[in-house]
Image (cartoon, helix red, strand yellow):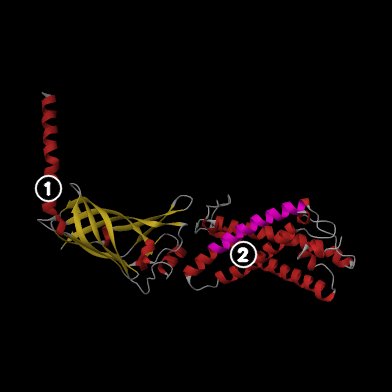
Amino acid sequence: MQSLTNTSARYGWAMIILHWLIGIVFIGQFALGFVMVRTTSQRASFELIQLHKSFGFLLLGLIILRIAWRLRNAAPALPASVGTLERRTAPLAHFALYVFQIALPLSGWALVSVSTLEIPTMPFDLFVMPNLPLAESDAAESFWSAAHWYLAYAGIALVALHIAAALRHHFLLRDSVLTRMITPSSGRE
Amino acid sequence: MNARILGLAAFAACLAVPAIAAVALSDAAGSYTISPSGSSIRFTIGKAGGGGFDGAFGRFKGTIRIDNGDVGRSKVDLTIYPESVGTGQGRIDAFLRSDAVFDAANNPEIQFRSTSVTRTGDATALVTGRLTARGKTFPEKFTAELGGLKGGTIRFHVTGKVLRSRYGMDVGTPLYSNIVDFDMTLMGKRG
């Protein structure tokens, strides 16, 4: 169990698993959101939206867990080969990624809370998730709908940049930045 | 003296109640056309976490025939046009009309044809029949209570529960209950 936590040179299993799980759900949520608003069948659209809400709450739970873990476990240092510019900007990009991970599910929750459709939320049909204490109105629904949309596109653009940076490290710079997020053993102590 | 009059009045009232009901039934016999202006078909579906979802059908037609000698041979036919559904929220109305729920374009009518009427009280009856929606037919039961008879106009208060899943309208369960609670006022005009 020693490899569960991060060290100064490698990521532990907890962060690795949370990273990939959240990554998959985050990208999946973008795809689901994209499809659900374009589906012509009203029934399929309704069901996809409920699924999107369920995964949104799963994402919120995972990211709270991840932030709690991250606050107790500093991220390992970048390899010595990483340049000054990236050394300064990468933490900002990672911080922004965390902001999007929190802001996206919260803005979605706000959207369903203020919606005049008053559709209840039951993540995976397990329990009723209460609404946020926000006043319901058509104007508020339009606002949160737009906010959620802009956050989604900005967030996915940042994820694309994150993936591009990881691939650059792996294939061009040939360092351990990507592989150490796959297994703790690839981080050099 | 006063006590005696009151006693007589009470006695007379006890006699009169069943008499009125009996008279009402024979008076009520005949055929009626359901008048949309004095009638309403409302429904409620419970929501997870409390509250409900209310709606009504604006357009419907039907007939009520009350048999003179045998209430059991009375008949109710009701046709509802799901296109006329209204909830006060346009987006929900469009959803209900769509193929997600009523598929009103392909199934423009919901029909109820009674198969038996059983009297359950002075002014109440259990109406069983066949409900057809989206091409599926199932037996359903409704409770009818005679609300009034005046001139050639008769009024019934009809309530009943229908499981929507059987008619291919299970979308949204369990967020929204499978049970649809109907509450109708049917006003019939003789002829």
Q: Does residue B33 appear anywhere in the picture? A: no
Number of the label disc, if any, that sits on residue B94: none
Q: Secondary structure at mark 1?
A: helix
Q: Does residue A108 appear anywhere in the picture? A: yes
Chain at tag 2? A
Query: Residue A7: where, in percent of width, then height?
Result: 82, 56
User: Label 2 to label 1, Cα distance in Å?
Assistant: 65 Å
Q: Quadrant location of residue B57?
A: bottom left
Say which quadrant the N terminus of chain B sits in: top left
Residue B39 belongs to the span the image colors magenta: no
Q: Closer to the camera: disc 2 or disc 1? A: 1
Badge 2 amino acid = Ala
Say which quadrant the C terminus of chain B sits in: bottom left
Q: Residue at x 70, y 64 (%)?
A: A20
The answer to which of B133 and A143 lies nearer the viewer is B133
Crowdedness near tag 2: few (<14), some (14–19) or many (≥20) residues, C-alpha within 10 Å: some
Number of the label disc, if any, that sits on residue B22: 1
Query: Residue B170: where, in percent of width, then height?
Result: 42, 63
Residue A66 belongs to the span the image colors magenta: yes
Are labels 2 and 1 on one chain? Answer: no
Q: Quadrant location of residue B114?
A: bottom left
Q: Is residue A176 left or right of residue B41?
A: right
Can you identify the residue that label 2 sits on? Answer: A146
The magenta-colored residue range is A50-71
Q: Residue at x 79, y 71 (%)?
A: A165
**Placement of A66 over or under A153, stated as above or below:** above
Badge 1 amino acid = Ala
Query: Residue B62: where, in percent of width, then height?
Result: 23, 64
Q: Looking at this rendering, what residue extends furthest in the front direction? A: A1
Q: Secondary structure at mark 2?
A: helix
The answer to which of A142 and A34 lies nearer the viewer is A34
Chain at tag 1? B
